[in-house]
Amino acid sequence: MTFAYADMPLDRCTNQRKNKSWLKTEFNNDNTLFCVINDGMGLFATNGIIAPIYLTKGQLPTLSVDSCIYLGKGDIALSQAEITDTNAATHIESNKAVSIFTVDFNKLRFSTQEELTEIGQWQPLKAMTPNLSPADASILALAKGMVHWHISHQFCGLCGNHSRAVEAGHARRCNDCRNMSFPRTDPAVIMLVEKMFADGIPRCLLGRQASWEKGVYSTLAGFVDPGESLEQAVIREVAEESGIVVENPKYCSSQPWPFPASIMLGFTAVAKTDAIDVTHDALEDAQWFSREQLSNFGVKSEVGEQNNEVEFKISSSSSISAYLIKAWKNKEIGQY
Ligand SMILES: [Zn+2]
């Protein structure tokens, strides 16, 4: 099973990117492409095909390597629609092993910012994901996550002075005390809780937040606390959100979730109790659903059009939440 954002086609070149002369060579290579992130949003083509716009160095003439973050290098098949610099596109077509950098829109000159806004539209990654190739979605997720980290970590966590990007944008060093900091990923557990009921029917536990579209239910999820194992986090979060006591958490799979900086770690767990209580945490409602009920669920629209013909819905098929629910329905995961 491949989830959105988990199909990275680029080699991150972790060892090479620390070498400044290697990095500069990649930066100045005519084939190199740039992905700009503006307030968490990506730049997308609007000429019929929905695809991210990768820019060439020629389109970003005043850019410096120090303001960019290296994402990686790979044999990626970019469609012509994704490259708006026609001359460069012909050149790139003959050699697809390209390096890709990302840069924060706010680091560009005003004139460049204006030009970019004319060639495409800024759109949030999550809304565009259903239309993107797995490779593009993964590249943009990395770009969005890295740019967000730099914006939110401009000051040293130890002494409070300014820090600056080093190591191709994959670390920051304090200008004063030299403390190094590295990009964060916040672990969150997401779990399919199941129980065999006295009537012989197994059911799973799904909940919803009040802010979600009407009828949308999802697996429970929550952040891992410091000093806590993933299994302990599963047990604690389910109890906090639903009042249900679970045991035997089993890891399934994971999904990068750059909204803004998480990884979702998917589990199954078996419930020992069945009386739901959502009065102590963020859920508006939680319910037990049988496989028969799940087969009547609709899919939540990702583009704002609400599907009001079904009572219950789950989120898009590329999320780990949807995977856990479907895999349990199909008896691919879980005990029952
Ligand atoms: Zn410091």
Image (cartoon, grey):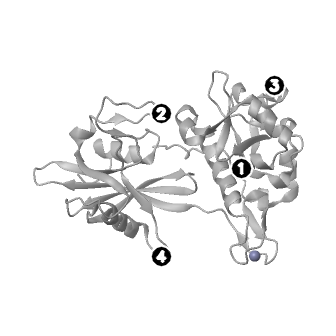
Question: Quadrant of the rendered structure where residue 243 is?
Answer: bottom left
Q: Which residue bears the numbered disc 4?
A: 227
Q: How far apart are marks 3 and 1 (CA)?
A: 23 Å
**Disc 2 residue type (three-letter):** Gly
* Cα distance between the residues tagged 4 and 1: 31 Å
Q: Quadrant of ligand 1?
A: bottom right
Q: Relative to 292, does residue 192 appear above or below in the rendering? A: below
- Judged by depth in the image, the label closer to the viewer, 2 or 1, is 2
The dot on residue 71 is 1
Q: How crowded is mark 1: few (under 14 residues within 10 Å), some or many (20 or more)?
A: many
Residue beneath disc 3? 86
Q: What element carries label 2?
A: loop
The residue drawn where x is 73% and y is 78% is 159
Q: What element carries label 3?
A: helix
Instruction: Say few, some or many: other residues with alpha carbon within 10 Å of mark 2 (under 14 / 14 to 19 / 20 or more).
Output: few
Nearest to N terminus: mark 3 or mark 1: 1
Query: Label 2, on which residue?
Result: 304
Of label 2 and label 1, which has the lower sequence position? Answer: 1
Residue at left offset 82%, top offset 72%: 175
Question: Is tag 2's residue or tag 4's residue first in the polypeptide sequence?
Answer: 4
